[in-house]
Image: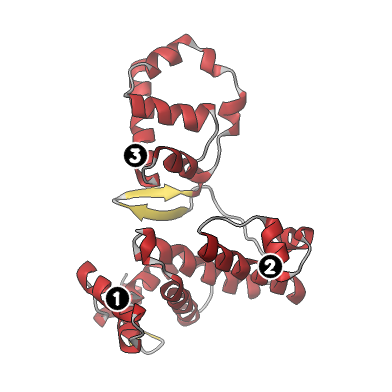
Amino acid sequence: MALYKVEICGVNTSKLPLLKNSEKDALFQRILDGDKEARDEYIEGNLRLVLSIIQRFNNSKEDVDDLFQIGCIGLMKAIDNFDTSHNVKFSTYAVPMIIGEIRRYLRDNNSIRVSRSLRDTAYKAIYAKEALMKLSNREPTIEEIAAEIGVKKEDIVYALDAIQTPASLHDPIYSDGGDTLYIMDQVSDKKNREENWIEDLSLRESMSKLSPRESHIINLRFFEGKTQMEVAKEINISQAQVSRLEKSAIRNMKNFLR
């Protein structure tokens, strides 16, 4: 962190304010009421979040001032689009937005160039998706996005694929209550769904030692191939809770099978 306790874009990072949750809530209510000073104060109070995120891109060889500025753009977009009715922490919503803004910047400045028309199509699709999600509170289909921006769905899929950069399954998405959620936690386990190991008696016996909720989660995750997000929606708990229960269940099963 010593590297970042300096002036970045004219900001003395060692003197950035640290807002309490109560202060953030009060400021955001003022923002909703149209208070521009509260918005500026809220931005300044979350610059530490931007600093923590740009450290993930140390190996990008990009100027830290540039990354900081782009991260701030992502932060402002997150503030302008955050919906308090969803009962989600602002940082949980803002982190993917900030990371996405930085990744878009790095893609646009990458030596492997994607044509301007492809980028324009992809960004139109992304913005249309965000707008449709805000209206319907659900993930829009490719067909709905295509109808919204007047582009063939095949062209949208191709454009979105062209601007993607490879991501590791071990990349963190966000942390909730000390439990970090990774990309791999969002991926269906097709291998376990296709194999026939459900018939193994020792496995059945170990599952019988689990609590009903743990057993249900293991069934949904590894026998039905659902993601943690799908499981969370089905049993009406948070994804972080699903992750904790899943890890606890697997640990108990391993102990029994030893």
| CA–CA distance in space, label 3 to label 1 | 33 Å
Q: Quadrant of the C terminus?
A: top left
Q: Secondary structure at mark 2?
A: helix
Q: Nearer the viewer, mark 3 or mark 2?
A: 2
Query: Which residue is disc 2 drawn over?
Result: 148
- Relative image position of residue 167 (x, y in whole percent): 57, 54
Identify the residue at image location x=37%, y=22%.
253
| CA–CA distance in space, label 3 to label 2 | 39 Å
Query: Which residue is disc 1 drawn over?
Result: 29
Q: Please rate how many residues cluster around mark 2, counting C-alpha atoms within 10 Å: few if below 14, some from 14 to 19, many from 20.
A: some
Q: Secondary structure at mark 3?
A: helix
- In primary-sequence order, the first of circles 2 and 1 is 1
- Relative image position of residue 231 (x, y in whole percent): 46, 38
Q: Is residue 170 above or below residue 134?
A: above
Residue 244 image label? 3
Identify the residue at image location x=67%, y=65%.
163
Residue 57 in view here: no
Residue 126 falls in which quadrant of the image? Answer: bottom right
Left or right: residue 227 compared with residue 238: right
